[in-house]
Amino acid sequence: MDDRKDWLALGPYSLSQAQKRALYRRELTALTAHHREHCAEYRHFLAAVGCPKDTPLEPEELPFLPVSVFKQRTLRSVPEQEVFKTLTSSGTTGQAVSRICLDAETSADQQTVLSRIVGDFIGQQRLPLLVLDSKRVLRDRAMFSARGAGILGFSIFGSRSCYALDDEMRLDLGAVREFLQKVAGRRILLFGFTYIIWAEVVRALEEQGETLAIPDGILIHGGGWKKLAGQAVSPEEFKDRIARRLGVRQVYDYYGMAEQTGCIYMECPCGHLHASVWSDVLFRRPQDHSLCAPGEPGLIQVLSLLPRSYPGHSLLTEDMGVLLGEDDCPCGRLGRYFKVIGRAPRAETRGCSDTYEG
C-alpha cells in the first residue's frame, strides 16, 4: 500500500461511490492480506469462513468480524512492543469492554482523518473549545476510554479549552461564563457526549433557571441516544432545548465507535450521516446477514481503510440503520449517507458515554 499517504490526503467527501469502490477493492484486499499474515486469530477466522488468499475482494465480499469479538479477545497485527496505546470502548457497569491495540501509525492516521472530516464542517481554523464534560476523564493517558479518546481527539480543534463540568460531574457555571467572556465575539466549538450534555448541562441549566448565550457556537455530539430515547427525547427536542438554554443552533450528531476511531460519520445540515472517503457502510439482514435492498433497515457493517495494528477494517455492529442514498445528498457531499435507527434486538446495551450513569 505504497500510496497510503495519497488517499489520506484526499478531500473527505471527494470521491463518488464508484470511485470509492475501486479504492476499497484494492486497499481492503491488501489490508485483509496484511492482517491474515500478522494476526494468527484473524488468519484462523478467514480460514473458517473460507476466504480465499490472493484474490481481489469486492467490499460486499469482505469477511466481517462481529464488533463484540474485541470484548472477548485482544487482537493485534503488530508486535506487542509496538502497541502505542490501548483504547477501551464504552460500556455500562459490569459489561466487558473492547480493547483496541493501536500502534503509532494507526493512531496518527486516525487523528489525521478525524481532523479532515471535522474540518470539512467547521473549517481549518482552531476555535475556542467548550468541552461539555469533566477533565477527569483524561487522567489515565495510557488506557484511553472511548469517551476520553473522543475528548482528546476533538481537543486538536481548540485554540483554548474550558471544561464545563467539575470532577463531580456538576456544571461549573462560573468557569463557563468566565471562558465565554474571554472569547466573546469569536465562533465557539462545543463538544460532548449526547447523554451527558442532556443530563448535566441542559437539565442543570433548566433546573437552575439559567441560560447561556453562545449564538455563534457549533455543537458536535455523539453517543448516548438510547438513554434519551428511553426518556422520550427526540433529536428535534434535544436540538430545540440546546438552542433555548445555550443559544446554539448549529448542532451536529455523529456516529462512531472505539473499534474504528477517527472514521466518524458526521451529520450534515440535512440531518444525514455521511461516510467519508476513509470509511463506508453496508446494511445486512439480521436473519442471514445477506445484503439489504436500498431503503431496507439492517445491521450496520462498517468498513475502514485505517486499521493496520488490529483487524478492525470490516466489522458488523449491533446497530440497525438504513441507507438513504449515495452521491446525491443536497448538502453536496459525495458517498453514502444513512441514518441509525437503534440497537438490534437483544444487542448488548452500550454507548459512548462509558459507564457514566446520570
Image: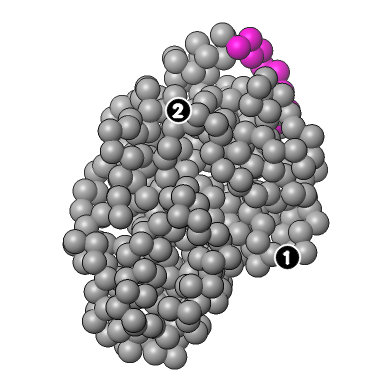
Q: Picture quarter containing residue 197?
A: bottom left
**321 left or right of 332 in image:** left
Check if mark 1's residue and mark 2's residue have beta carbons within 8 Å.
Answer: no
Residue plotted at (34% across, 46% down) = 354
Between marks 1 and 2 in the image, the one whose residue lies nearer the viewer: 2
Residue plotted at (34% across, 81% down) = 209
Residue plotted at (37% across, 22% down) = 73
**Badge 2: how crowded within 10 Å, few (<14), some, or many (20+)?**
some
Q: Mark 2: which amino acid?
A: Ser
Which type of secondary structure does the marked residue at label 2 adopt? loop
Nearest the camera: 101 or 187?
187
**C-alpha span from label 1 to label 2:** 34 Å
Location of mark 2 (residue): 68
Q: Check if residue 330 falls in the magenta segment.
A: no
Across and down, in percent, residue 326 comes to: 77, 49
Q: Earlier in the sequence, mark 1 or mark 2?
A: 2
Location of mark 1 (residue): 331
For residue 250, say whether it is visible.
yes
Segment tinted magenta in the rendering: 49-59
Across and down, in percent, residue 24 comes to: 68, 36
For residue 77, say whether it is visible.
no
Position above or below: 141 against 52: below
Nearest the camera: 163 or 61?
163
Residue plotted at (27% across, 85% down) = 178
Nearest the camera: 275 or 227?
227
**98 left or right of 9 in image:** left
Which type of secondary structure does the marked residue at label 1 adopt? loop
Q: Mark 1: which amino acid?
A: Cys
Q: Main secondary structure of the magenta part?
A: loop
Picture quarter with the C terminus: bottom left
Q: Check if residue 51 falls in the magenta segment.
A: yes
**Badge 1: how crowded within 10 Å, few (<14), some, or many (20+)?**
few
